[in-house]
Image (cartoon, rainbow, N blue to C red):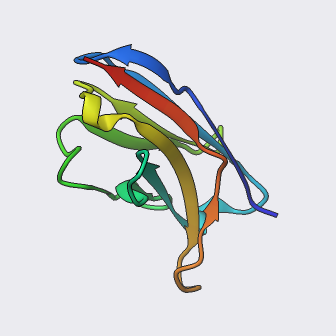
Amino acid sequence: QVQLVESGGGLVQAGGSLRLSCAASGSTFSRYVMDWFRQAPGKEREFVAAITWSTGYANYAASVKGRFTISRDNAKNTVYLQMNSLKPEDTAVYYCAAREIGLGSYRYWGQGTQVTVSS
């Protein structure tokens, strides 16, 4: 059973930084793509960044490219989202997700962690 546990959210001033962590367990994640999504109040959940675990290939939403960096630590089975130059519009609940390559679009989800950026 895949489990994803996010941590690292909090309150930060605009221009500041946070690093989110997603601890993954219950599978061999070298076969997975790991994503970060976010959902702001009253808005739909949106894609933020993704990384292919085996290759380290990453891609980003246009709104965060150049400010956010996704990475993974194989030894710790953990995915990170380093967020720099944060803006108030980055305020949202951030979710980690895992999708097994070749098995369609189904994703496992974490419980989310709140990020609040004050102006």
In the picture shown, does residue 58 fall above or below 118?
A: below
In the picture shown, does residue 60 fall above or below 12?
A: below
Residue 40 at x, y percent in the picture: 41, 45
Residue occupying image coordinates x 43% and y 49%:
38
Residue occupying image coordinates x 17% and y 39%:
66
Q: Is residue 118 left or right of residue 98?
A: left
Q: Is residue 104 left or right of residue 4?
A: left
Residue 114 at x, y percent in the picture: 53, 33
Nearer to the camera, 101 or 49? 49
Residue occupying image coordinates x 34% and y 30%:
83
Q: Is residue 84 left or right of residue 80?
A: left
Please, which residue is most extreme toward the right here? 1
Nearer to the camera, 74 or 47? 47
Q: How many marks?
A: 0
Quarter holding residue 17: top left
Residue 119 at x, y percent in the picture: 25, 17
Please, which residue is most extreme toward the front here? 42
In the picture shown, does residue 13 fall above or below 116?
A: above
Nearer to the camera, 48 or 55? 48
Residue 67 at x, y percent in the picture: 22, 34
Quadrant location, the N terminus: bottom right
Residue occupying image coordinates x 43% and y 39%:
92
Q: Is residue 43 left or right of residue 103?
A: left
